[in-house]
Structures are given as structure tokens and as C-alpha cells.
Image: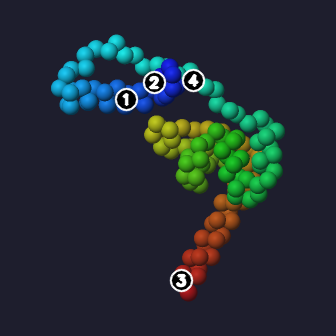
Amino acid sequence: MANRRDVAINTQKTALNALAYLYNQFLNQPLGDLGFTYAKRQRRLPVVLTVQEVQLILDQLSGRDKIIFSILYGSGLRITECLRLRVKDIDFQRGALTVHDGKGGKDRQTILSPALRVPLQELIENAIRIQQQDNIRGHE
């Protein structure tokens, strides 16, 4: 399977477990030692966009979406990490972002591009204004 059909290791494990179950449960015959070894697939390098390609994408965006994509690219965040950022995770003084519960459940710090400082501060101030207006309307 691994050599002829180029299947993943988990697929190989599933097939081997199915054979073992067939022999042990239905045929009442031990499968024995097959001398089976999992084929290892070569790790492929990821496809990475060039700086120019990223700039072409960013040029098509504006506002909040442009800030989100700029954080993803400039700070190396995953989508869920970026969307879970809180205001208190942003350190404008140090130019850093704190990611909580990232890959592997770990916390880490990464850089915040200086070019995002002003747009991000404006976005936060706008969100605060909207929240304050909603609070005023809620008390009327």
C-alpha cells in the first residue's frame, strides 16, 4: 500500500489493524509477525508566497481585514490565534503580541510590525467608541 499507492501512515495503520482484526476475530487464526514496517513519506517543503505576492493580496484589502491579514503575515500567527487576540495581548510599547493557547496549547510572544501600530490603535479606539455608544443606548 505504501509503495504502490502512496498512502499516509495512518491509512497503513488502519489497514494493518483491519487485517489483524479479520484474522484474530473471524478466521480465529493469529496473524503472526508480518515484519511490517511503515513507509516514511518525504516531508514536503511548504509553498510560500513571495513578498510581492503578499503585497498584491494586501493591496486588495482594506480596514479590519487588511489589519488581520497583515498580522497573520507579519507576526506569523495562525488564523485562530489572530482571531482570539485580545487588546491586553497587544504590547504597543515593546512591539509584541502574546498568543495564548497556540499550537500545542502553548503560550508565546511574537513581534508586532511597527507599520500596524497606528492602524491597530485606531481599530481598537473605534471598537471602544462603538461599545460606549451601545452602552449609552442600552441605558436609555
The image's mark for residue 1 is: 2
Whether residue 93 is visible to the viewer of this picture, yes or no, is no
Q: How is the image coloured?
A: rainbow
The residue depicted at 56 percent of the width and 76 percent of the height is 135
Query: Which mark lies nearer to you, 3 or 4?
Result: 4
Q: Amino acid at mark 3?
A: His
- Nearest the camera: 39 or 30? 30
Q: Residue at x 80, y 44 (%)?
A: 55
21 over 95 or under it: above or below: above
Query: Helix, strand or loop at disc 3?
Result: loop
Q: Sort mark 3 into few (<14), some (14-19) or many (20+) by Cα contacts within 10 Å.
A: few
**Image quarter (top left, top right, bottom left or bottom right) of the C terminus:** bottom right
* Amino acid type indicated by mark 4: Arg
Residue located beneath label 3 in the image: 139
Sequence-earlier tag: 4 or 1: 1
Which of the labelled discs sits on residue 89, or is there none?
none
**Mark 3 or 2, nearer chain start:** 2
Q: Are marks 1 and 2 in contact (CB under 8 Å)?
A: yes
Q: Earlier in the sequence, mark 2 or mark 4?
A: 2
Q: Which mark is residue 43?
A: 4
In this rendering, the label closer to the viewer, 3 or 1: 1
Where residue 118 appears, x then y in whole percent?
75, 53
Label 1 secondary element: helix
